[in-house]
Amino acid sequence: MYCRAVAFGGFVYCFLSAFQSFGQQAAASDSAFYSGSVRQLYHIYFDQIGQSAELFNGAEYIRNGQKANGFPFFESNDQLPGDVSCQGILYHDLRLQYDLVLDELITSNYTHDALIRLPKEKVDSFSIAGHPFVRLDAAKTNGAFADNGYYEQLTANDMPVFAKRVKKLVVPNGYEDSKYVQYNTFYLKLNNGFYAVEGKNSLLDLLKDKKDLLKKFIRTNKLNFKKRPEEAIVRTTSYYARLKS
């Protein structure tokens, strides 16, 4: 166990980096108590450092004022509950919005009188409304990703599936209103490489050592890669992981 000392206003606050290991050492019956204690310590810590926290060093966010059907954010037009890991420090119980047009994570500033973009280069990961996202570096994905950005991690096994969520503002030629349209692209991490999954055939080509068993699984469970690609990809890859375990 060790302490990380951070000085603010003449005081030194000891932020225990051992919080996570502390909880892991606890008995299962005491896990709720330790979890609550850790969260309380986080709140005390951030109440003390206030707006000096690295999290609040983002630029102001101003929403596009163009009238359109829908909204640019993930899941909801309103702020959603979530947590953010920023340079290894976990910030709990925030109100977040994830702008899928700009690929920007948004929260209120410390005084809650403006919205700010969280500094993307400092955000390691975040969860919003129970959906976990990680920031991935395109240079480390063997060319599978065109850009750095946030990707939702859909599975947590040895061969995780990621989804890139993007929204675009579509402006029609006629008298219809503009609207936000969401697009999803899926990727599989396999043997330390990242691969785009464009449909059933591309996935089966990646997992060809169990191809016959996977085809049977897809037929039996009536998985539809065209109408429900996310469900089909997640269930098929999860089944493959079980076959390989």
Image: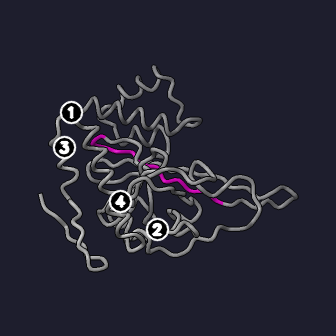
Q: Three-letter amino acid code at disc 2?
A: Leu
Q: Residue visible at 38% across and 61% down?
A: 136
Q: Give the image location of residue 186, x and y in percent.
A: 46, 48
| Left or right position of 98 against 18 | right
Return the residue at label 2: 118
Q: Secondary structure at mark 2?
A: loop
Q: Residues within 10 Å of mark 3 (few under 14, many from 20)?
A: few
Q: Three-letter amino acid code at disc 3?
A: Gln
Tell me where the magenta segment starts and ends, as one range.
Answer: 157-168
- Spatial CA span between label 2 and label 4: 11 Å
Q: Residues within 10 Å of mark 1 (few under 14, many from 20)?
A: few
Q: Residue visible at 17% across and 49% down?
A: 21
Q: Secondary structure at mark 1?
A: helix
237 in relation to 22, above or below: above
Q: In the rendered image, which quarter is residue 214 located in? A: top left
- Spatial CA span between label 3 and label 2: 30 Å
The reply to whether callout 4 and callout 1 are in contact (CB within 8 Å) is no
Return the residue at label 1: 28
Return the residue at label 4: 85
Return the residue at label 3: 24
> Residue pushed farthest left?
1
